[in-house]
Image (tube, coloured by chain):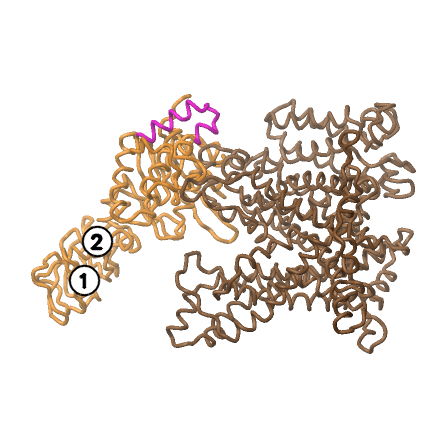
Amino acid sequence: MRPATRLTLIIGWLGYVIVPWYLPDGWDLSGYPFGRVGTALALAISGAAPWLWPIGLALVAATLLVIRGNTSFSGRGLIAVGLLGLAALAAQGFAITLPGQGMPSLAVLLGGAGAAQPGMGYGALLTLVSLLLLLCHGLAYRGVCRGDLFTTSTIGVVVLLIGLFIFLPVATILRSALVDAHGQWALGEFVDRLFSSTIWGTGCLGGGIACGVAWNTLILGVLTGLITTLLGLACALLVLRTAMPGKRLMRAMTVLPIITPPFVIGLALILLFGRSGVVTGLMVEWFGIPRSRWIYGLPGVLLAQVLSFAPIAFLVLMGVVQAIAPSLEEAAQTLGAKAWPTFRTVTWPLLRPGLANAFLLGFVESLADFGNPLVLGGNFEVLSTKIFFAVVGAAHNQGLAAVLSIVLLVFTLAAFGLQQGWLGGKSYTTISGKGDSGLPAKLPVAVTVLSAAVTGPWVALTAVIYTVILIGGFVKTMGRDHTPTLEHYSTGFSVDLSHGLFFSGAAWPSLFTTLKVAAISAPLTALIGLLTAYLLTRQRFVGRRLLEFTTMLSFAIPGTVLGVAYILAFNVPPIEITGTGLILVLAFVFRNMPVGIRAGIAGLAQIDKSLDEASTTLRARSFTTLRRVVLPLLKPALIAALIYSFVRSITSVSAVIFLVSAEYNLSTAYIVGRVEAGEFGLAIAYSSVLIVVMAAGIALIQLGVGERKLGRKLGRKPVALAAPAAELAS
Amino acid sequence: MTKSRPASVEFNHVSMRYGPVTAVDDVSFTIHAGELVTLLGPSGCGKTTTLRMIAGLEIASRGQILIGGKDVTRLSAADRDVSMVFQSYALFPHMTVLENAAYGPTVKGLGRAKAEAMAREKLALVGLAGYEARYPAELSGGQQQRVAVARALVLEPQVLLFDEPLSNLDAKLRRRVRQEIRELQQQLKLTVAYVTHDQEEALAVSDRIIVMSNAKIAQQGSPRELYESPANGFVADFIGDANLVDVTIEAVHDGQAQIVLGPLRLTLPARGLTPGPARAAIRPHGITLGPGLAGTVRKSSYLGDHIELTVATPVGELLVLSRQTDASPAVGAEIELSFAGRSIALVS
């Protein structure tokens, strides 16, 4: 047995014998090692929790195997012990939970009839990790993954994490959609709810009643997808194919949606076009157009989403336009085609798959968007907001929320499946890896004019919006009273220096929590994402396709669905973490994990596999290869993953709005609260602070990680914001 | 640290399958200690897979692999005493030349000073002293290749593997580097397995050549054996050019076969063949202009030191490389061809 296995076993005993088994209430250790802070061994011996015995027996068996040392039997033995131990742990955890819940029949079998126990804590965690690693080591000793302990262990950990924090919550949603209020299976009720007219009603066609929420969502998604794609295309063509001035500015715009919390655009739109907005006021004064609430509803949400997501489409389509080899267009021209026929017969057909991709991306973004519909929706409900109100509203209808989540999940999965399956093999753009020289064809005049005509107003409006965001915090009431003031900033961010340093502003606690949670979750996200990417691309093992499929699915889970899933799954033992900071960290890690995986896969694709193999033939094991060869070369991907998960943690609303608590409130949830209370000044001031904080955070991460060094010739590749932006777009 | 000596490699009925595809099918051979053996064949014949199985980068689906008499079939690459020079060189781009070369001993935990001393020694051996602080991107292709060789040599492995090491070099450099590899191998008495698809390269560097085709061994032997007595049409055509013609064996006496080639009658080593229809391989440069087989010139190209002719004869079109450059026959000319003894061989 290698030392790592012994260490693993020690960790297991530590968790079983010394560390308290359950999640503690604070740091009160009175009564140790019994009661709430009891260790598993003490609780089992004293008879308080006899269902913990099998886990201990598994550890004893593992110890015997490790002491006996290397025999052909020990690998197989460890596998069996690990599996049985994990099964015992899971069985007692899920069978014995709160009084009256769990699985009573299984509880009887485990000797815990009628018993209850709190959520598992650090002791259970250590034991779980130990049993899992023993199982993985056993597999390695049997020759799985060429006997590499590190590889099998990593696979085990990743599978467990994805199982617990993606698969389990989604399964919980499905389950709660299928049961009634008493926990009984109720298929009829499910079918009723699934096909109810609030979801699928088409009343709006005849006029009068509002349409079903599913139709609203789809209409909004399709419109957003179409408009963002067209805007993005116009912009990309202008920037890449004309001598238009201000290209740098246009490219800089692509960074904006990344560092802007999703509802901020909606907020700025209210300040401009709301009943008492700046523009509305001007319209009344100049043209006598009466004030109205037109911005609240489909037009407003659509406008906000287009402004929010068009830069993403721009980024995607810039890549697509760039990837069209100029030599193809030159070939068309040498064959006698003029500008317009060249565009129509060569450029456009080559663009089409990219356009479809951009459309689907915009569609999915729109479906997942929660902030803008919340702020601007009014009576226009979409699935994400409806889910929110089903959970937090007066009705508190978990079943409805679950059903709506399933509908939303199906929509996004379908779009995602379409994007992957249908477009996967249709891209013409990556055929040649060689640099194709040549000058791209000039754009036909008509296309140039059209592009400029749609791009101009969009850029102008975006500029106005961000001006509003910047100055909105420095005036009394945007639209009514434009007296300069620092009042909003002092409410939110005042610092009292009279008795030492005291952050007295109302916004400080949520900002500190946000930064703390983001700073903790970003490295975890990057680590798990890159490790998963490494496993998926560089290791061969049974079930790799399944793991790949599951992680792909997790790409498509909208934040609202994940949030609902988390409260449903982690509100009760065995994992009872609702209301803690931990659940926020976990939500961020697994919400952003796809970004880490994508960054990792993209980064690894650029590192030739022969480098790994060269390292292996020079006697390095997987871990050494990963640390010395892969990781240093993966630095750009690491930066992208870090920046991206950090920024997304700060801007995320949809997933966490369900998960925040009085103790752990987050900036976005706080701002949404201020908007709902009508305190627009503070909300907009806080939003600009967030944007500045994120810009600073990005700069810090880039400094901290540094650049990879590939010699003087290649070393100058700047890792700019374009890297994470490209991640978002891919 | 005990220096390991160059060791033999033995394959016993080794197969490699990827799902339904058989990349290597029941292959057996031995590479003796201190010998340079080339695995030669067209792309997709299984030669690289065979090499990677020696390295441990692929674990054989079936059969047994011995290195130095020890069964290593299930050992991972990191546990085998084998180093490899990759086709792409696979130099770590973020490490200097010295760090690259010192990688093996460093990850083995020999300590920085010791590792660097070993690396410097081998870098000097390949003529790269003074380049230690450079990054791979700052070296020419030939220099990168030497770094790759030095890095592979530093641990003094039992077996050294080359995977098409010259394919990224230009033609002139290729000739020089292959000589250097051969000299290094003989100087250090290394056991080397060398993969290439270039028959000239294989003939130039090898003690023995294993020709592979369709996942199997087509023939193994010394360069001269393969060239002069190819076992079959594939080998004849792959090693040097060959005209494959149909012949008839009339009789076999004392290992010599009487054959009929169109209007000609020749006596050739029978190589185990029996009377009946057979095939013969004729080397293009072994055909001379002179009395024998009549034919008509179809194509004629002047190539400086020789003339390349395509001649239509009763036995089919023949490619002829003639050294007689002073008088090149015109297209349509009627000529006669004769065959030197060693340039024609019966093949199965």
Which residue is nearer to you in this view: A259 or A209? A259
Task: Report if residue B109 lies within the magenta region.
Answer: yes
N-term mark: 1 or 2: 1
Start-end of magenta stretch:
B103-124
Q: Quadrant of the C terminus of chain A?
A: bottom right
Q: Residue A593 location, x and y as percent? A: 65, 47
Q: Quadrant of the N terminus of chain A?
A: top right
Determine whether the residue tagged by mark 2 lies in a helix, strand or loop: strand
Determine whether the residue tagged by mark 1 lies in a helix, strand or loop: strand
Can the viewer see residue A543 in this picture?
A: no
Task: Report if residue B276 lies within the magenta region.
Answer: no
Residue A726 vs B139, above or below: the answer is below
For residue B261, the mark is 1
For residue B345, the mark is 2
Which residue is nearer to you in this view: A9 or A419? A419
Chain letter belonging to callout 1:
B
Residue at x 61% of width, y 59% of height: A311
Residue at x 10% of width, y 61% of height: B289
The secondary structure making up most of the magenta span is helix
Q: Colour of chain B?
A: orange
Q: Colour of chain A?
A: brown
Q: Quick one: which residue is furthest to the bottom in this view?
A: A206
